[in-house]
Amino acid sequence: MKKYYAGWLLCLAVSACVQAQESTPLQQVIKVIASPKVYGVTGAQLMRQLAPSCKPSTLDQRTQYKRGNVECVAAVGADVFSVSPEDGKVTLVQATFAGAAHCDAFKQALINNFGKPSKSSGACALSWRLAPASKGGPARQVELEGSAADDKVYLTLGEEQGP
């Protein structure tokens, strides 16, 4: 009987540890979009990585102009989330998340993935200028800004356009 209870308690402890390590929907989204891999995938591949927390928007076109072409569950807190182009290789991700307090999570993920920022003009106003992924390719940029005034975090990842 003691072995049964010991086994049951061990199982319960392992289950509690596994549940404690599960990430929130926001953490899952941060892990995906704060990664250099976002530049090398198509919009469809990015959406598969963001699932089940986010999906392509089903809102009407006019609303998508305001809110973006990606919808996320409420726990993510995405006010605006756009990926372009939807059908080709991703060249731009723009997102606005509620809660300026989340800036540290974004900042840490970006520093882990892209290194020290090229420019910093505040605790949560950072930018990275990254080398092209391939010789002759476009330079890549990442911008992060947190605003206490409207309690939001703004994130932009993109490739430079033009000659």
Image: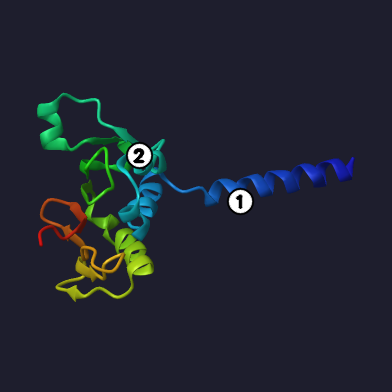
For disc 1, the marked residue is 17
* Secondary structure state at the residue bearing disc 1: helix
Residue in the foreground of this view, choosing between 16 and 140 = 140
**Residue at image coords 31%, 59%:** 106
In the displayed structure, does residue 16 sit left or right of residue 92? Answer: right
Residue 151 in the image: state x and y as whole percent: 17, 51
* Secondary structure state at the residue bearing disc 2: helix
Give the mark, 2 or 1, whose residue is nearer the N terminus.
1
Count of number-bearing discs: 2
Quadrant location of the C terminus in the rendered image:
bottom left
In the displayed structure, does residue 76 sit left or right of residue 121? Answer: right
**Residue at image coords 68%, 49%:** 13
For disc 2, the marked residue is 47
In the displayed structure, does residue 95 sit left or right of residue 43? Answer: left
Residue 47 in the image: state x and y as whole percent: 35, 39
Above or below: residue 34 compared with residue 83: below
Residue type of the residue flagged with mark 2: Met
Q: Quadrant of residue 58?
A: top left
Residue 56 in the image: state x and y as whole percent: 29, 32
Residue type of the residue flagged with mark 1: Cys
